[in-house]
Image (spheres, grey):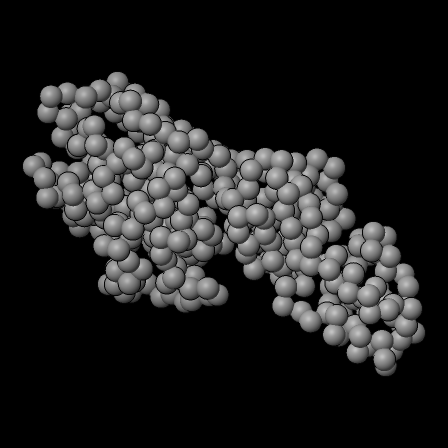
Amino acid sequence: MMCAAHTCGRTLVIDHARAPGEKIRISGGGRCNFTNLATGPENFLSQNPHFAKSALARYTPSDFLDLIARHEIAWHEKARGQLFCDGKATQIVNMLRLELARNGADLWLQSTVSNLRATPDGFSLTVTRNDRPQHLTTRNLVIATGGKSIPKMGATGLAYDIARQFNIPVTETCAALVPFTFADQRFKALSGISLPVRASNTRISFDEDLLFTHRGLSGPAILQLSSYWAEGAAITLNLIPDTPLLDSLRAQRQTTGRRQLSTELTAHFPQRLVDYLSHDLNLTRRLADMSDDKLQTLCENLSNWRLTPTGTEGYRTAEVTLGGIDTNALNSSTMATKSHPNLYFIGEAVDVTGWLGGYNFQWAWASGHAAGHAISRGPQ
């Protein structure tokens, strides 16, 4: 829809879903985290970290905010530059539909594509709508079908299939921004507990909230880290990233030394988490019995909890797909494929994956804008 809003000439958007923009509708708890003020190339993963620079520079969060303002959509900023609608996320969907219609583009829902092939003048394809197949031809073809994330909403690997049909390379894909799982369900007793942590591995670290689940670990810190995780690799949780716990425990030892260490720790952690950690960390002793060295060791253990997830929840709950259309095959200014100049790939289908927090939407707007303007500049 973003791309169609910026093309000129007759444009048709084909969607197999019952309603457009379903990922927009469910995002941000129904309020759509539609961009991030801190958007920059460093917030994206790609085999070519420079690829996204051009599109992101030419369509920024400020540009999208201008569009939001024209449609009088109220918004607010949360932590780390994340912008959300004050109202429902469907406001963004409706805005894009209005922009699409204003530009004279059509939207066909519950439509499927088959028999796609290249022609001397562009492409031909069959679109089946209301059980009626129609043969269409087009000079320009834009693939904006996303990745494999959340298949229950209709996500498929269609973009990758089309790429391979035209001998366009596709990098390895996997679920990203996704919870970790543990085969033994070791955190089942902690399900629902959330706390701020520093989640890290050998590549990167994130200071955000952690959420324990029946099947493993989730929350923003874990989702962020999952994009940098490989199967079999360990992760590290720092449960006291900004807490001077050692100083606090030493001070409390002077005034309330008879108290159980576990009791004192409930001032810093949820009771269930303290109970869970009690056996491994021997938290049953009194504060008075803890030397400085023992308190130091305790704090080191709390700040260096190493775990090895069994896997992830996979595409079923992943917010995005990591990998995709190889950026070496695309023009970074236009999003057109180098081997087929009238064939474009945009958004999540491309090997550009943003962090959690509105970055992936900004990439969708920016890459759609880039392709739309490129098509408008060329012959129709």
* Quadrant of residue 142 within the rendered picture: top left
Q: Between 224 and 329, which is closer to the camera in this rendering?
A: 329
Classify the position of the N terminus by image quarter. Answer: top left
Residue 25: x and y in percent read 41, 49
Classify the position of the C terminus by image quarter. Answer: top left
Q: Between 94 and 67, which is closer to the camera in this rendering?
A: 67
Q: Between 255 and 87, which is closer to the camera in this rendering?
A: 255
Q: Does 301 sit left or right of 41 as displayed? A: right
Residue at screen point 87% across, 78% down: 256
> Among all residues in the image, which is located at the extreme left?
379
Count of numbered labels shown in the rendering: 0
Residue at screen point 30% across, 44% down: 51
Task: Examine the rendered structure and indicate whether residue 377 appears above or below residue 301.
Answer: above
Residue 279: x and y in percent read 86, 52
Residue 146 in view in this figure: no
Residue at screen point 22% across, 36% down: 336
> Among all residues in the image, which is located at the extreme front?
293
Residue 303: x and y in percent read 69, 59
Residue 334 in view in this figure: yes
Task: Examine the rendered structure and indicate whether residue 340 appears above or below residue 8.
Answer: above
* Quadrant of residue 72 within the rendered picture: bottom left
Q: Does 23 sit left or right of 338 as displayed? A: right
Residue at screen point 89% across, 75% down: 257
Q: Does 140 sit left or right of 218 as displayed? A: left
> Among all residues in the image, which is located at the extreme bottom?
255
Task: Examine the rendered structure and indicate whether residue 37 appears above or below residue 361.
Answer: below
Task: Examine the rendered structure and indicate whether residue 106 appears above or below residue 355.
Answer: above
Q: Does 178 sit left or right of 242 as displayed? A: left
Residue 28: x and y in percent read 47, 54
